[in-house]
Amino acid sequence: MSKGALALLVRGGTENWSPERWKSRFLDACGSRRVALLPDDTIDPNEVYYAAVWKPAEGALSAFPNLRVIFNLGAGVDALIADPSLPRVPIVRVAIEDLTSRMTEYVVFQVLLHHRQQLYLWTCQREKKWAPKFQWAADTIHVGIMGLGVLGLDAAQALKRLGFRVSGWSASPKDIAGIDCFSGENGFEPFLKQTNILVCLLPLTAHTRHVLNRKAFSMLDRTSPLGAPVLINAGRGGLQVEADIQDCLNDGTLGAATLDVFETEPLPQESVLWSHPNVVVTPHNAADTDPVAISKYVALQIERLEAGGALENIVDLGRGY
Ligand code: NDP
Ligand code: OXD
């Protein structure tokens, strides 16, 4: 009996999303199973049981009548599930140690960058100015993390270990040692009111779109040694209202921002965010997805499923994440 093939549909364009690189890793991980990088005229659509995808073209997956599982090659599924013709099969997203620790590195690095006044120090260095400033302790800063899922929780715990006061906001109530937990609409304002550095690790859904807006920024706490609050968004660009971020940086409602994700990616050349002195821009690679670790994760899930086991990290389409 045929093992069925795995079809790989990867929208490339950047070094870490090279389709050929993904194919080579999947060939290593999948043993004797056929791996076809689409478009591939030699593949019989009936033969495709599994698809591993990143931002496939709308409708591309409906070509496979025997599809059993769609593996999304990242943690966020917003782009994938926006396709109304998506086959009704389980969608599995990435939730693995490799990706989680990369995101935690990013969040810790960016929180420390703002906490340790690195933007100011870089300016001093460029001007050859020896001008130390008072440096406050970590426990005077309250970091608030939006999203206490796989990524948010790990980042929260790492920041807690560094001595920051940490709180989190999620859809459902949580009880996590050492972390002040808030949830739902009622928890939003009290969560923001005690936050000095706001870190967003939410998925993009109908409920979370544009949650990072002027109204939210105005509620952040301004009484810490940091003064004006800081925004760090590594979730999705659709979570933020960029015009509000720019205006709030300019009128002091926000002191600084680190943005890894944008309403339009790549960030357009004309965006003022590129050169704003208080903004750190990174090109959506807070937590690069590693083809070696992820192809192994997918191959293992297929093996387990075919041995009668259950899939892990299935997306709940009702919630949208
Ligand atoms: P999870 O699904 O594990 O966690 C999502 C968290 O968001 C949960 O705590 C959930 O609450 C919370 N949440 C969802 N909707 C709401 C809402 N309406 N109000 C309040 N809280 C809400 O996701 P991950 O942690 O794995 O990933 C989060 C996101 O990070 C991804 O969806 C992706 O967009 C982004 N990402 C970005 C990367 C980058 O390189 N920039 C890399 C990887 C991911 P609850 O726990 O109650 O369900
Ligand atoms: C992801 C991403 O969702 O890289 O994994 O953005």
Image (spheres, grey):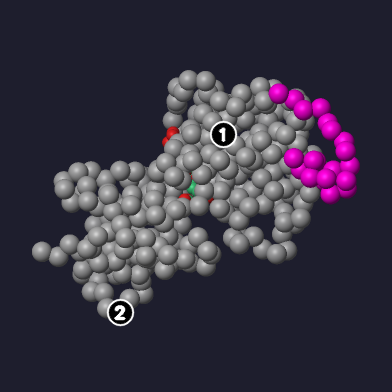
Q: Which residue lies under the disc numbered 2?
A: 41
Regarding mark 2 in the picture, which secondary structure is present there?
loop
Residue 246 painted magenta: no
Residue drawn at (22%, 51%), measured in percent from left and top?
A: 303
Q: Position of residue 43 (x, y in %)?
A: 26, 74
Quarter residue 149 falls in: top left
Task: Please state if 267 lies on the left or on the right of 182 as rendered.
Answer: right
Quarter residue 137 falls in: top right
Q: Position of residue 63 (x, y in %)?
A: 29, 70
Residue type pointed to by label 2: Asp
Q: Which residue lies under the disc numbered 1?
A: 145
Q: Quadrant of the C terminus?
A: top left
Residue type pointed to by label 1: Ile
Residue drawn at (24%, 60%), measured in percent from left and top?
A: 31
Q: Around disc 1, counting alpha carbons within 10 Å, would you say few (fewer than 14), some (14 to 19), or many (20 or more)?
A: many
Q: Is residue 216 visible?
A: no
Frontmost residue, 267 versus 160: 160
- Which of the two discs, 1 and 2, labels the residue nearer the N terminus? 2
The stretch in magenta equals: 118-137
Regarding mark 1 in the picture, which secondary structure is present there?
strand
Q: Position of residue 266 (x, y in %)?
A: 61, 62
